[in-house]
Amino acid sequence: MRILGLDFGEKRIGVAITDPLGITAQGIDVITYATSDEAFGRIEVICRSYGVEKVVVGNPLNMNGTKGAVAENALLFANRLKKLLNIPVVLIDERLTSVSAEKTLIAGGVSRKKRREVKDKLAAALILELYMSLQ
């Protein structure tokens, strides 16, 4: 079963997917969008082309575990995605995945410009790996 992982942001969405056996996660894309319809269209195409059966969306809770405006937007995004794709869409606490992705890239000596290009993709892979480790 293939699972799609999304690091939702207001301008960019990091995208990761599992291998066909659901063992590993790899970042595949960063969707930069101007309208939500554009983002949903791209995600739908990715899901159809990979045969995705479930979507995991990072839920950016505040450090104290409460929901802020961004977490509310992630919930609305996940609910709309569920209706569009007609497959299970789950939210998972993703506090600090973007920070972790940034630190990993810095430690790997990745340039600032390249980090901007891949950070969201890596964060999506970390979200997906976290979800898989809890199953």
Image (cartoon, helix red, strand yellow):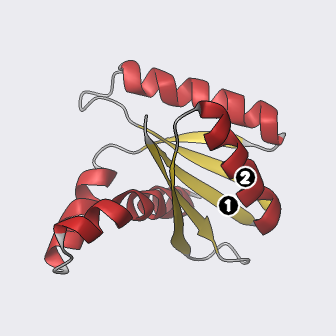
Above or below for 7 versus 48 = above
Above or below for 25 versus 67 = below
Q: Badge 2: few (under 14), some or many (20 or more) residues near its Cα, within 10 Å?
A: some
- Give the side of residue 100 with respect to residue 68, left or right: left
Q: Badge 1: few (under 14), some or many (20 or more) residues near its Cα, within 10 Å?
A: many
Give the residue at mark 1: 3
Q: Residue at x 72, y 52 (%)?
A: 54
Can residue 10 be seen by looking at this rendering? yes
Q: Residue at x 36, y 31 (%)?
A: 61
Dividing the picture into quarters, in which one does residue 24 lie? Answer: bottom right
In percent of width and height, residue 10 lies at 43, 34
Above or below for 78 versus 41 = above
- Choose the circle earlier in sequence order: 1 or 2: 1
Quadrant the N terminus occupies: bottom right
Q: Residue at x 16, y 71 (%)?
A: 106
- Give the side of residue 115 with respect to residue 82, left or right: left
Give the residue at mark 2: 54
CB contact under 8 Å: marks 1 and 2: yes
- In the rendered structure, which amino acid carries the disc numbered 2? Lys
Above or below for 131 versus 70 = below
Q: Residue 90 got which mark?
A: none
Along the line of sight, which residue is nearer the eye, 103 or 119?
Answer: 119
- In the rendered structure, which amino acid carries the disc numbered 1? Ile
In percent of width and height, residue 95 lies at 32, 43
Along the line of sight, which residue is nearer the eye, 95 or 80?
Answer: 80
Quadrant the C terminus occupies: bottom right
In percent of width and height, residue 57 lies at 55, 44
- Give the side of residue 37 with respect to residue 6, left or right: right
Distance of label 1 from label 2 (alpha carbons): 5 Å
Dividing the picture into quarters, in which one does residue 89 lie? Answer: top right
Could you say whether the residue bearing mark 1 is in a helix, strand or loop? strand
Along the line of sight, which residue is nearer the eye, 90 or 29?
Answer: 29
